[in-house]
Image: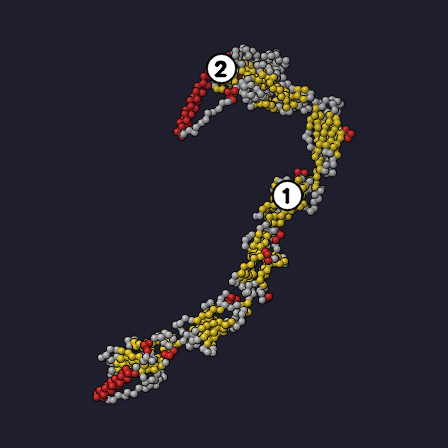
């Protein structure tokens, strides 16, 4: 390897010599001596990391109009070059490298500015002072100095805890040590990405240290420290992470329920959360100062939190109790924290009702004021309190003496009706609750418990009269008095031997001996509260048979039954009963015989399409009344079984056509009715008929209407009205009648044992009949009135109507109603007369 080097040296020497000789011919001799000492300035500094490439600049500025022909690189002041680069124009540029120094790692880049010598895979041996010399074609040679520094990265890093855990505020508990590296690396501590300690120191044997001087805090529990070491910005930094263990007590303790509200009867989960304790705190629960067993708790531990859950079956007794959750540090007893939670438990009202303190429940009298207090224990408070008396709600009513406030009830001037069971009902969001019952008994003076009575008693007939009162207290004393119109204000006090007493009843044994013994008996009672204000009254009269029933009518007639209803009259002073008898008209056979306490009957069974006569009688122990008679016309069987055919829902077109047809039918019917009315009016002026109405056995409800023509007899139920048709229109008329004596044969074909009363019924309207004048039938025709003869049992006289005698059609005299005549027919029924040659007349 020395051969090429020696040859090149000699070649270079010869070239220099030749150049010098040529130059000597043209110029003066130049100095060729080069200083080999290291300059003090103008030395380029190059740093490179071991294993990377280094660029050594040859910072020489070429002279003008000249070019370099040869570049030589030396180590320091050495005479032998370690690298050369030939740039003569006559030759191809080429480089040479000393194999012992650079080998093939060196390459010259002349086109860079400045030109550089590129060294690859630099090692620590390459760290030297280099010299660059450039020879020019015409100018003197020039040189430059370059110092190459090689950086060795650190090789290892570790954290060395000195003690752990640490207390709050302590420092220097851990050291970060870095090995290797030249120059020594920089060792720093970081927390949350921020540099907190950069005080690194050099150790022995090429190591570097950094003691952590940051005081310990709670932040260290969640934010670890990072140690980083580096001596360059090319290779990755060495990193070590350290989690500081800090002894610290709990930072906060909080109790909260999982669900709200807390409700009685439900299982509650109460959560105690402990934050900031390291190591984890010991959690204990206390209720009203007593520790809760661990069986009722659940504990969960996370990074910086301890959660304890207390399971509690709630009752109304838990409301207002205090729960304590205590968190204790294992090694720091002074760092114990606790939280107090007061239970707010919702529950239904608990209600208690009491009577006012000043009132004696055993001595409550009429006229006092009552006061009740409703005590309610509820959470939340009740939004409504209701008051009940015997289950009925009491509302605020000042005029009635009921004063209702939020939790009290006042009753002013109470009477016995205020006795009974009282309760209050309280309501909140959890439900309604009733209080206990308070039973109130208002003491009151005796009051009559029986209605005033009218008693019929015969002379020398013993009778028992019972007086009953209502009183509280029931220890009453009775007193009887007697008075009548003769005595007036001087009442007779009856001897106590004449009556007895059993509890709240007293029975008087009384016998009227003369007419002066009839009058009014009064019964008084007295108890501890006071005397009876209104006595019980019993009026004694001479007993007799009852009066005849009134307002009888036949109702609900079917083919097999009929209802008969009457109103009872005076009972004669004795209890009365009622008898119904029904006979078949044609045969006189008795088909119904029934009695009852009221004059309301159902006559059955009857035959369809038949006519029956009925009689209703009232009777008591003194006798019976005259019968009130009625006629019953049962329906035919066919009339009871009429039914409508099933109908199919019509279409809209059919409905429209039906409406049109109905309108046409109605219009036609109206026109026909107008024509018929006119015809009947004309016919009525031409023909009239005298009609008789016969009433038998003093009963206005059994009427027979007979036309003067043969075969025109009609029987109906009810009283009489009349409608008379005149040329100017129809006139409704009421009938008047008079009685007169006449023996007659019964309407029903048999002789009546009673006197038959004949009454002539005449029209009493203000129609033209008053102007008729004259007699006979002509008076009826011209006056427009209708004469009717009513036959009725009893005494009476004849009557004529419209100025003519209707019974004979002649000019009989008209007799007005006498003083002995009846004033009330009692029943009212329409009689329709169909008379030949005359229009229909309604009675």
Q: Looking at the image, is mark 2 or mark 1 earlier in the sequence?
A: 1
Q: Position of residue 379 (x, y in %)?
A: 59, 50
Which disc, if any, is residue 423? 1
Q: Look at the picture and state if 531 lies above or below 612.
A: below
Q: Is residue 290 visible?
A: yes
Which residue lies at the image location 41% right of the left edge and 26% below the top edge?
A: 658
**Residue 484 visible in this rendered orientation of the protein:** no
Q: Toward the viewer: 559 or 468?
A: 559
Measured Cα–Cα span from mark 2 to mark 1: 78 Å
Asked whether 693 or 79 is in front, the reply is 79
Count of numbered badges drawn on the protein: 2
Rendered location of residue 772, percent (x, y)? 52, 14
Q: Nearer the viewer, residue 213 or 799?
A: 213
* Left or right for 601, reference 496: left
Tag 2 secondary structure: loop
- Residue at the spot of label 2: 838
As rendered, which of 47 and 217 lies closer to the eye? 47
Q: Coloring scheme of the render?
A: secondary structure
Q: On the image, which quarter does residue 185 sit in? A: bottom left
- Circles 2 and 1 in contact, beta carbons < 8 Å: no
Q: Residue at x 67, y 24 (%)?
A: 575
């Amino acid at each position: 390897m020395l051969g090429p080097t020696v040859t090149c040296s000699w070649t270079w020497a010869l070239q220099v010599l030749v150049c010098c000789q040529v130059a000597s011919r043209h110029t003066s001799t130049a100095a060729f001596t080069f200083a080999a000492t290291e300059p003090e300035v103008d030395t380029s500094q190059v740093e490179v990391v071991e294993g990377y490439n280094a660029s050594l600049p040859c910072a020489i500025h070429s002279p003008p109009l000249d070019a370099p022909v040869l570049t030589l690189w030396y180590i320091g002041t050495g005479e032998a070059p370690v690298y050369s680069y030939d740039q003569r124009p006559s030759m191809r540029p080429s480089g040479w490298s000393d194999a012992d120094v650079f080998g093939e790692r060196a390459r010259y880049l002349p086109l860079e500015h400045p030109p550089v010598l590129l060294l690859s895979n630099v090692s620590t041996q390459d760290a030297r002072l280099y010299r660059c010399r450039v020879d020019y074609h015409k100018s003197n040679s020039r040189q430059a100095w370059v110092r190459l520094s090689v950086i060795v990265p650190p090789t290892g890093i570790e954290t060395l805890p000195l003690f752990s855990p640490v207390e709050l505020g302590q420092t220097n508990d851990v050291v970060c040590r870095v090995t290797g590296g030249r120059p020594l690396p920089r060792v720093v501590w970081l927390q949350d990405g921020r540099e907190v300690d950069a005080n690194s120191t050099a150790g022995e044997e090429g190591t570097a240290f950094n003691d952590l001087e940051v005081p310990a805090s709670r932040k260290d529990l969640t934010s670890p420290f990072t140690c980083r070491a580096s001596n360059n910005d090319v290779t990755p930094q060495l990193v070590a992470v350290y989690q500081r263990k800090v002894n610290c007590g709990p930072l906060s303790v909080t109790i909260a329920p999982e669900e709200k509200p807390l409700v009685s009867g439900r299982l509650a989960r109460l959560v105690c959360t402990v934050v900031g304790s390291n190591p984890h705190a010991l959690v204990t629960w206390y209720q009203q100062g007593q520790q809760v067993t661990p069986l009722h708790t659940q504990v969960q531990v996370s990074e910086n939190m301890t959660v304890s859950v207390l399971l509690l079956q709630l009752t109304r007794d838990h409301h207002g109790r205090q729960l304590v959750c205590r968190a204790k540090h294992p090694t720091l007893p002074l760092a114990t924290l606790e939280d107090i939670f007061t239970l707010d438990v919702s529950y239904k009202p608990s209600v208690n009702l009491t009577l006012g303190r000043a009132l004696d429940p055993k001595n409550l009298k009429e006229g006092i004021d009552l006061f009740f207090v409703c005590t309610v224990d509820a959470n939340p408070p009740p939004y409504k309190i209701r008051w009940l008396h015997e289950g009925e709600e009491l509302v605020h009513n000042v005029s009635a003496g009921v004063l209702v406030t939020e939790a009290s009830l006042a009753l002013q001037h109470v009477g016995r009706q205020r006795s009974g069971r009282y309760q209050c009902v309280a309501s909140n969001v959890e439900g309604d609750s009733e209080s206990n019952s308070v039973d109130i008994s208002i003491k009151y003076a005796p009051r009559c418990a029986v209605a005033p009575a009218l008693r019929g008693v015969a002379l020398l007939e013993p009778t028992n009269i019972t007086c009953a009162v209502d009183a509280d207290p029931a220890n009453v004393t009775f007193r009887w008095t007697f008075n009548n119109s003769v005595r007036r204000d001087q009442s007779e006090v009856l001897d106590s031997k004449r009556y007895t007493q059993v509890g709240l009843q007293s029975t008087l044994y009384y016998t009227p001996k003369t007419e002066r013994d009839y009058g009014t008996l009064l019964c008084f009672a007295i108890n501890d509260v006071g005397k009876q204000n209104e006595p019980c009254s019993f009026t004694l009269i001479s007993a007799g048979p009852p009066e005849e029933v009134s307002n009888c009518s036949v109702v609900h007639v079917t083919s097999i039954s009929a209802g008969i209803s009457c109103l009872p009259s005076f009972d004669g002073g004795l209890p009365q009963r009622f008898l119904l008898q029904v006979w078949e008209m044609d045969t006189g056979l008795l088909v119904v015989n029934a009695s009852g306490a009221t004059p309301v009957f159902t006559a059955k069974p009857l035959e369809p399409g038949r006519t029956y006569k009925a009689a209703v009688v009232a009777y008591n122990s003194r006798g019976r009344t005259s019968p009130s008679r009625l006629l019953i016309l049962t329906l035919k069987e066919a009339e009871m079984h009429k039914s409508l055919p099933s109908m199919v829902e019509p279409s809209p077109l059919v409905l429209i056509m039906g409406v049109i047809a109905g309108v046409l039918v109605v219009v036609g019917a109206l026109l026909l009715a107008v024509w018929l009315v006119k015809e009947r009016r004309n016919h009525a002026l031409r023909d009239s008929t005298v009609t008789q109405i016969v009433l038998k056995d003093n009963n206005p409800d059994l009427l027979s209407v007979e036309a003067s023509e043969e075969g025109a007899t009609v029987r109906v139920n009810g009283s009489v009205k009349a409608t008379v048709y005149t040329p100017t229109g129809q006139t409704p008329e009421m009938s008047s009648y008079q009685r007169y004596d006449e023996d007659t044969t019964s309407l029903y074909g048999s002789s009546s044992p009673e006197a038959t009363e004949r009454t002539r019924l005449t029209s009493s309207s203000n129609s033209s009949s008053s102007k008729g004048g004259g007699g006979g039938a002509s008076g009826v025709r011209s006056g427009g009135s209708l004469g009717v003869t009513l036959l009725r049992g009893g005494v009476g006289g004849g009557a004529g109507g419209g100025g003519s005698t209707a019974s004979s059609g002649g000019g009989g005299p008209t007799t007005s109603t006498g003083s002995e005549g009846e004033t009330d027919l009692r029943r009212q029924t329409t009689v329709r007369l169909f008379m030949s040659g005359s229009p229909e007349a309604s009675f």
